[in-house]
């Protein structure tokens, strides 16, 4: 072989190795990139799970890119909208599964997860993971809501501690009566020193949906393309009339308060009851001097127990160049036994029944306050109602959030919901 031919051959070999390294890394390793929330506990738990996975799969390397929530959503839209092959694995908020599917962002996962593996997830999470009858994501986390209450304020006003038994949960009507007794304005200036009740996410559908859900109300049609007749139904009008009355008629909930302020109102003793995510118990437990406890999420008399649910799922980029390796990583995080390790490090209520079984068997979760996960386990499997499945979820949520805020501030309930339904339906036309 001549010198020129040798040089050309060497150049081709080097170029081939370099190109191979773009997707496979050094020494034949496959690199899987992933986007994630930058906040704790994700940025603390994921590196440890990566280490576990790579020990079991030395030919695969996981590269995680962390972003704040807003940037994470923007990165997903920009990269996947341009058909970029990375990230290979992405965080997907549960209600956005249908939207991302309609935009062609996600790779169907049925070929990677057996029916047995899919059955590991609780029904509400599995339902949220599907679109068009196909499995489009794998549930990573779940969530629920509980009724936190201030034990000192209850005691000082002659109110006994609440039951933790889901069968003895309070009705919203009973919560209102308690809230009236616990809204305390000692100096009679019209501004209570203690408010009776508030929802943590004061205007967000995720939490407020439990009100109409308890009365049998739905958020959208089965095909996800019509909100008229649903969010302006009698059930919704009744539910949000009750919600409006908490702030305006009975004045037991503080107007003007934001989602970011509600937990602080509770920890500082300015709020007797707070409906909020179970994970907030850690903040309450770390607040010096705060006497608190929790009870199951309320429901309407004559209705059914319905609780908010849903959280992050994992999806695989439709244009990934390493689908098999990406699926292996996703399966490690979301099915047993990896999902149990994820829960131990992450701490959010899990969607996998194996992780829930771990909660049920470990003695740690039989003691207060960690026994809150036992209540969460019950709710996840018995009362959880996922958010509406629609390709236009972002539009639906945006319009409804403003409608709920207007209702909280005193706007006519029926006309506000009817107007919101009309606006949403006009936005949903593009998905038909």
Image: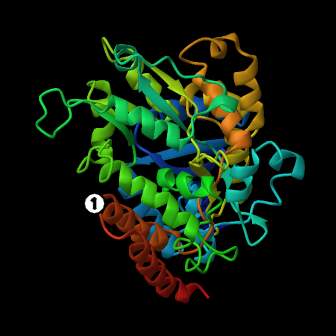
Q: Residues within 10 Å of mark 1 (few under 14, many from 20)?
A: some
Percent position of residue 284, x then y: 39, 22
Quadrant location, the C terminus: bottom right
The one nearer the camera, 296 or 430, is: 296
Percent position of residue 153, x then y: 34, 19
The one nearer the camera, 165 or 158, is: 158
- Which quarter of the picture shows residue 271? top left
The one nearer the camera, 142 or 181, is: 181
Residue at 88% from the left image edge and 52% from the top image edge: 115
Q: How is the image coloured?
A: rainbow
Percent position of residue 180, x then y: 36, 36
Residue 396 vertical position relative to residue 149 in the rendered view, above or below:
below
Quadrant location, the N terminus: bottom right
Residue 256 vertical position relative to residue 76 in the rendered view, above or below:
above
Residue 83 vertical position relative to residue 373 in the rendered view, above or below:
below
Q: Is residue 337 visible?
A: no
- Which quarter of the picture shows residue 219? bottom right
Percent position of residue 308, x then y: 57, 48
Residue at 49% from the left image edge and 74% from the top image edge: 81
Q: Is residue 32 visible?
A: yes
- Which quarter of the picture shows residue 417? bottom left
The one nearer the camera, 345 or 287, is: 287
Residue at 36% from the left image edge and 18% from the top image edge: 157
- SS for dot 1: loop
Q: Is residue 27 left or right of residue 91?
A: right
How many numbered marks, from 0 up? 1
Q: Is residue 43 left or right of residue 368?
A: left
For label 1, the residue is 409
């Amino acid at each position: 072989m001549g010198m020129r031919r040798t040089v050309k051959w060497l150049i081709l070999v080097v170029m081939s190795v370099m190109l191979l390294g773009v997707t496979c890394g050094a020494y034949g390793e496959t690199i899987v990139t992933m986007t994630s929330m930058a906040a704790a506990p994700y940025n603390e738990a994921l590196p440890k799970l990566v280490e576990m996975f790579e020990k079991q799969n030395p030919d695969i390397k996981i590269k995680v890119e962390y972003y704040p929530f807003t940037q994470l959503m923007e990165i997903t839209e920009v990269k996947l909208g341009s058909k970029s092959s990375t990230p290979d694995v992405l965080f997907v908020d549960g209600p956005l599964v249908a939207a991302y599917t309609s935009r062609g962002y996600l790779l169907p996962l049925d070929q990677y997860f057996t029916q047995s593996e899919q059955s590991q997830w609780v029904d509400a999470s599995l339902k949220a993971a599907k679109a068009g009858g196909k499995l489009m994501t794998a549930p990573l986390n779940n969530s629920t809501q509980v009724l936190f209450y201030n034990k000192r304020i209850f005691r000082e006003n002659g109110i006994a501690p609440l039951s933790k038994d889901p069968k003895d949960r309070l009705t919203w009507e009973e919560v209102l009566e308690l809230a009236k007794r616990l809204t305390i304005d000692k100096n009679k200036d019209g501004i209570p020193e203690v408010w009776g009740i508030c929802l943590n996410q004061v205007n967000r559908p995720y939490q407020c949906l439990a009100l109409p859900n308890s009365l049998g109300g739905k958020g959208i049609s089965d095909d996800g393309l019509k909100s008229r007749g649903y969010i302006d139904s009698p059930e919704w009008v009744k539910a949000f009339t009750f919600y409006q009355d908490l702030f305006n008629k009975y004045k037991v909930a503080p107007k003007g308060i934001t989602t970011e302020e509600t937990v602080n109102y509770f920890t500082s003793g300015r709020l007797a009851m707070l409906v909020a995510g179970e994970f907030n118990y850690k903040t309450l437990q770390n607040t010096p001097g705060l006497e608190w406890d929790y009870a199951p999420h309320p429901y309407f008399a004559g209705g059914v127990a319905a609780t908010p649910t849903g959280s992050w799922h994992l999806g695989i980029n439709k244009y990934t160049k390493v689908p098999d390796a990406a699926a292996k990583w996703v399966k490690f995080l979301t099915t047993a036994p990896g999902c149990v390790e994820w829960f131990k490090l992450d701490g959010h209520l899990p969607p996998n029944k194996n992780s829930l079984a771990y909660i049920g068997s470990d003695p740690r979760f039989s003691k207060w306050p960690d026994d809150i996960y036992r209540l969460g386990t019950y709710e996840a499997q018995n009362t959880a109602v996922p958010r509406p499945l629609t390709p236009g979820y972002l539009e639906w949520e945006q319009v409804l959030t403003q409608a709920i805020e207007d209702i909280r501030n005193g706007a006519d309930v029926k006309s506000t919901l009817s107007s919101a339904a009309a606006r949403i339906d006009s936005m949903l036309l593009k998905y038909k």
